[in-house]
Amino acid sequence: MQKLVTLALLFAISRVAVADTDTELIKKGKYLSEMADCYACHTAEGGEPYAGGLAFKTPFGTIYSTNITSDKQHGIGDYNFEQFDKAVRLGVAPKGNLYPAMPYTSFDKITHEDMQALYAYFMDIKPSPQPNPDNDVMFPANIRMGLKVWNFFNHSPQKYVMDNSKSEVWNRGNYILNSFGHCGECHTPRDMTFAMEEDKHYQGAMIGNVWAPDITSKTLVQQGWSTQDVKDLLRSGSSRKGTVVGEMYTAIYHSLSKFDDQDLQAAAVYLLDSDAEVAGKDLVSNTEANQGEGYQLYMGYCAGCHGIEGKGKPNFAPGLAGNGSLAHDNSINLLVATLYGIKPQHYSTLVSFDDMPAYGDKLSDAELTELVNYLKAAFTDSPVRYSVAQMSSLRKEVEENQKQATH
Ligand code: HEC
Ligand code: HEC
Ligand code: HEC
């Protein structure tokens, strides 16, 4: 009798232990799915979580993300682990090869252990019976077989390989940003076939009408980012070096703001390529630089919000002194903000901004040239200055991109 009770007790304990590891695994999977931002791509505006239907414009046409809830008919509820793993890491789903808008060229580096946690989480998600819309892509890209060819040339699945010359924290940063974080999907340029050019890792690329900037450690360090600046921006969307707009705002809102402290630190260590805390540089503010027409325009249109010294005001307008959008040689984002303005953005309970007005109708090409040259001289170390002809052609390019992005 004594023995039986003990056995029953043991059994009960091991049942609880199993349930605990399951919950732990699901919890871990939820965290990893946030790091990978599965939600942002697989949820339509106002739609049910993970039920898909968000449209992606690609050079081949419009494709839609799919329902990845545990619904057995329209979702992935009847995928076994191998099928899930193949779809997420290799881009090969039971229905055929997936379009590379699903970032499997980054997710391929996710470890087997982490894939198991993701699988446990997705099998536990509330099912949604939402059917998948048909994709609208051009011949020959509409043939999923064609993607087999794309995969043959462009995708040789990689495993994450530790770099033993670097610290464990740096390696964690490299692993999470280049697998889950899929930062390169936006920040690494693509070649003619839409594949990431790995020899130009993080050197910057156009995403719709904005430029996902060069975020190589060399550039970030040269532009004076500190460890704290990087952590502030990734966690809250706002830092001493400015705020973010467009797709980066979404990435921060749904994903980066959920990184735990250790992973945030690892991301900063990897991005700045330094285990030691980087102090960063003082913000550039040479407002004596030039008191010509550009200065007058700045004082008339911009200084009321961004400050005479370009220091900004908390929760009102970001500083322009030392701002990331101004410091790059590429001025596309600076022009997009100035010509079209920025809608109000809410970053967190502590940080939110009202809108920035649009100046496209107010500034001639000559005035825009003077203004931008003033901003560069006053608030950055960049030697870049524009002639009116160069500025007109850059403005045309920005207007063309804007038309296509909002079309
Ligand atoms: C950048 C956008 C993006 C992100 C991030 C993303 N997906 Fe996707 N995913 C897509 C698109 C688009 C498709 C549809 C591709 C197609 O139909 O060829 C897709 C397809 C899939 C499929 C195939 C479903 C089927 O019909 O067989 C699975 C599974 C999937 N995603 C899971 C995930 C998981 C899990 C994550 C996070 C770890 C994730 N996705 C993150 C865009 C994304
Ligand atoms: C009414 C206040 C206001 C005025 C006037 C204004 N801005 Fe802004 N500006 C803002 C706000 C608010 C933001 C931040 C929006 C956000 O990130 O959510 C901003 C952001 C920017 C950014 C992007 C900075 C970053 O960190 O991403 C640039 C560049 C910029 N402004 C340039 C200008 C220029 C040039 C002028 C004058 C022609 C100007 N602004 C006038 C309020 C203003
Ligand atoms: C969906 C596209 C997309 C993804 C994914 C993405 N970014 Fe961005 N990122 C952008 C865009 C666009 C900007 C420019 C926004 C701005 O300056 O207002 C940006 C800006 C930044 C900046 C500011 C740079 C500067 O000079 O001001 C940093 C740092 C950054 N991203 C880091 C990351 C990291 C790290 C990841 C991966 C975890 C990531 N991004 C993922 C699109 C993306």
Image (cartoon, grey):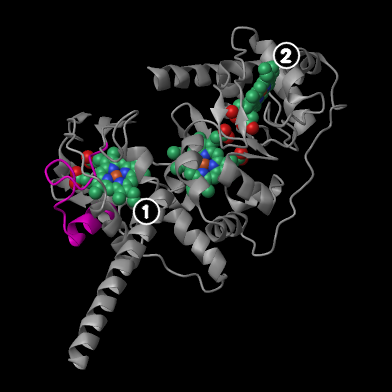
**Label 1 CB, ligand 1: below 8 Å?**
no
Q: Does residue 153 show up?
A: yes
- Amino acid type, label 1: Lys
What residue did someone put label 1 on? 30
Q: Is residue 189 magenta?
A: no
Please identify the quadrant where the C terminus is shown: top left
Vertical placement of residue 142 versus 157, above or below: above
**CA–CA distance in space, label 2 to label 1:** 46 Å
Percent position of residue 6, x then y: 24, 87
Residue 40: quadrant of the picture: top left
Tag on residue 349? none
Residue placed most toward the observer, 305 or 333: 305
- Amino acid type, label 2: Tyr
Residue 277: quadrant of the picture: bottom right
**Label 2 CB, ligand 2: below 8 Å?**
yes
Mark nearer the N terminus (2 vs 1) = 1
Q: Does residue 204 show up?
A: no
Percent position of residue 56, x then y: 32, 32
What residue did someone put label 2 on? 301
Percent position of residue 65, x then y: 27, 37
Which quadrant contains ligand 2?
A: top right
- In the image, what residue occupies the spot 75% across and 33% down? 321
Q: Is residue 81 magenta?
A: yes
Which region of the structure is painted magenta? 65-88
Residue placed most toward the observer, 305 or 279: 305
Please identify the quadrant where the N terminus is shown: bottom left
- In the image, what residue occupies the spot 31% across and 57% down? 118
Q: Is residue 311 left or right of residue 212?
A: right
Vertical placement of residue 223 versus 401, above or below: below
